[in-house]
Structures are given as structure tokens and as C-alpha cells.
Amino acid sequence: MATDIEIARKTSMKHIKDIAAKLGISEDELILYGNYKAKLPLHLIDLERVKQHKLILVSAISPTPAGEGKTTMSIGLTQGLNRIGKQTTVVLREPSLGPVFGMKGGATGGGYSQVLPMEDINLHFTGDFAAVEKAHNLLSALIDNNVQNKKNNLGIDPRTVLWKRVMDMNDRSLRKIIVGLGGTMSGVPRETVLILLPLRK
């Protein structure tokens, strides 16, 4: 049996405009990211139409110790329903970069039940995770600056108020970190936490 990557590389991908047309979405509505990826505007969500259709939620199916199998099952279920004449599409969460370099791998399915382009989806997709990461960590920097600032200080106590930093990567050594070392110009020394995107409690 061919590996996931071998199957993906042998597959001839359709242009995202053709995929959109099958879903009844006009080319003008697409925010293109090359030939095979696009974003859709939120106004396409029609709640009245949603009420007339069925939503199948696939969660925690065939889990392994590493949590594999849910995406493959979701894609396979959608392929099967389309094969028997139902008009279906699958909606998947954007993969976190961390597992791609760990033992689990990415989140684009496997075998003949996977979404393409696998490498793009797993590594950067449309850049949303990077934007969330930057926005969140900008707030971290603003909070640190306010704790350091004596004039306009909001009275945030870093011992009792914790604003976690985020990074889209599994980096065990950064889970608990000390920040603010290096003297008075480098902030207030304290322990903090860096968590993996997507944001978790």
C-alpha cells in the first residue's frame, strides 16, 4: 500500500474554483490563496438553509494513543455519502503545526481519505494561526509593559493574574518559563506559561 504522501503526490488536484462551483459558490465570492485554497466570506452562512439540512458531528472516532483517525473517518464518511448520491461536504478544524513534527503527524486524513494540498494545509494554510499567535502575544507584550510601567499601571498582579503566551509548536521546554530576566529594563522576573495553539485552558 502506498503511503499517504505517495497517494497525495499522485493525485491530480482540481482548481479551488471548480470545487467552489460544485458547492454552488461563485468565483467572485472566493478569497484565493493560490490555485487550491480559498477563504469564504461569512455572509455565505445562511441560517435558514442550514435548518433545512443535516449536520453530522464526528468526534473522537477510533482514537489511538496519539489521537489519530478522526479526520480520516470524517473525510471517508463524506466521500461515502457523496458516493451514494448525497450532496455533502466536510468541515475540518485548521491543523495545529505542533503535531506535524511529532509522532501524530498532521490533520489532513490519510490513505485515500485525505484533503489536499496536504503540505500547505499542515504547514501554514492561509496564515490564520500565525495571525492569532501574533495578536495574542501582542497582548502579552502590552500586559508586560503595563506591569513594568509605574505611571499608568493598571495594578495587574502577575502572581495572581496569568496571561499565557502561545506558540503553534510542541516545545516541551517552553511549557513553563521564566520571563523578565536581565535587569530592570527587561521586565519583572516571574514564571509564566507558553501553550500550544489552538488556545486551550
Image: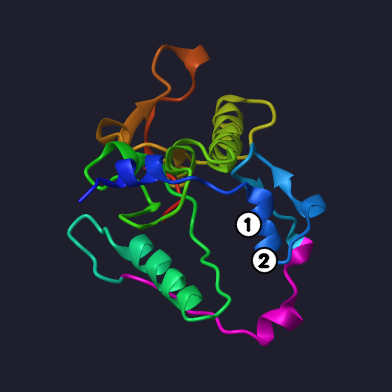
Q: Secondary structure at mark 2?
A: loop
Residue 173 is a magenta residue: no
Tell me the magenta residue range. Answer: 43-60
Which image quadrant is residue 6 in? top left
| Dot 2 amino acid type | Leu
Mark 1 packing: few (<14 Cα in 10 Å), some, or many (20+)? Answer: some
Residue labelled with disc 1: 19
Label placed on residue 23: 2
For the stretch drawn in magenta, what is the main secondary structure?
loop
Which image quadrant is residue 63 in? bottom left
Please tell me whether residue 185 is drawn above or below residue 102 in the rendered image. Answer: above
Mark 2 packing: few (<14 Cα in 10 Å), some, or many (20+)? Answer: few
Residue at 44%, 45% (x, y): give it: 197
Please state the horizontal and vertical placement of residue 90, each as a whole percent of the image: 51, 66
Please state the horizontal and vertical placement of residue 115, each as a whole percent of the image: 45, 53
Say whether marks 2 and 1 touch (CB < 8 Å).
yes
